[in-house]
Image (spheres, grey):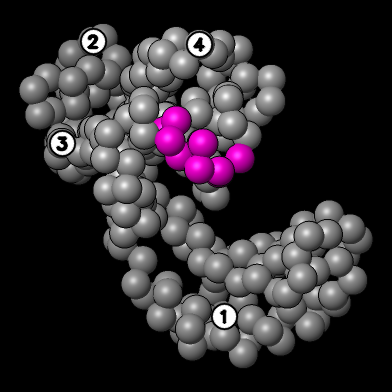
Amino acid sequence: MSRGENQTQTVEIDQRPVSLRIRTSTRARNMLLSVNPADGGIDLVLPRGTPVGEGLVFVESRSRWLAGRLRALPAPVPFLDGAEIPVLGVPCSLRHCPDLHGGVWMNDDEILVTGRAEYMARRVTDWLRRTAKDEISRRAHQKAELIGQRITHISVRDTRTRWGGCTSTGRLSFSWRLLLAPPNVLDYVVAHEVAHLVEMNHSQKFWQLVGKITVDADRAKAWLTAYGQALYRYG
């Protein structure tokens, strides 16, 4: 496996096949192993020059730990009729309405979804992405204005390793799954990335700036640590 090359294999953990994604890293000093809550797969990072076979032996040595982590993953919640999902922390029921027209919209504590049943999951996902971008963009631009900064672009994706990102050119990116979190948690992540427009670090000045444009940052961080991975169970 050459530098930067990725591989995917299937390994057996707890007597069932599991996808194992292997990649090399020039920055990794040790082999790193993790369970991805988004799809139940395993991610293995190898330092440059480490043989794949050595990585597979490492995976085998940690099979009991991996089995426990896989069993602890929360049950998935597909976007089907009757499923319950949180929107800004409020439980909402998905309701398939094939006889109605108009796409997807929220009505009190229900999310109404028109069209054919086989397209329901995709329609719900698209609606959540659009709604997340609207909510995040509104908050981000307000916070940027408070500190005299300008955002050049905002994107919303289904990221698996980061809740948000900021570049030196003013481009911000976020996970749409933040829409499933409580409002203060979403607001904190937005403030975190907007603050990076001024401080591209995590210095004391950075955290002071975060505190000026959001509230309860410590509580929001604690919530993400405790419950953030559970947001990947939806969809």
Mark found first going from the N terminus, 2 or 1: 1
Q: Residue at x 32, y 48 (%)?
A: 218
Could you tell me the amino acid type at mark 4? Answer: Gly
Question: Circle 2 sits on which residue?
Answer: 101
Q: Nearer the viewer, mark 1 or mark 4?
A: 4
Indicate the position of residue 172 as horizontal and vertical percent values.
Answer: 56, 25
Amino acid at the residue labelled 1: Glu
Q: Label 4 neighbourhood size at 10 Å, few (<14), some (14-19), many (20+)?
A: few
Looking at marks 2 and 4 on the same chain, the residue that comes earlier in the sequence is marked by 2
Q: Is residue 103 visible?
A: yes
Q: Is residue 59 left or right of residue 29?
A: left
Indicate whether residue 203 is drawn in magenta. yes
Residue in the foreground of this view, choosing between 194 and 98: 194
Q: Residue at horizontal 80%, vertical 81%? A: 53
Q: Are marks 1 and 4 in contact (CB under 8 Å)?
A: no
The overriding secondary structure of the stretch rendered in magenta is: helix
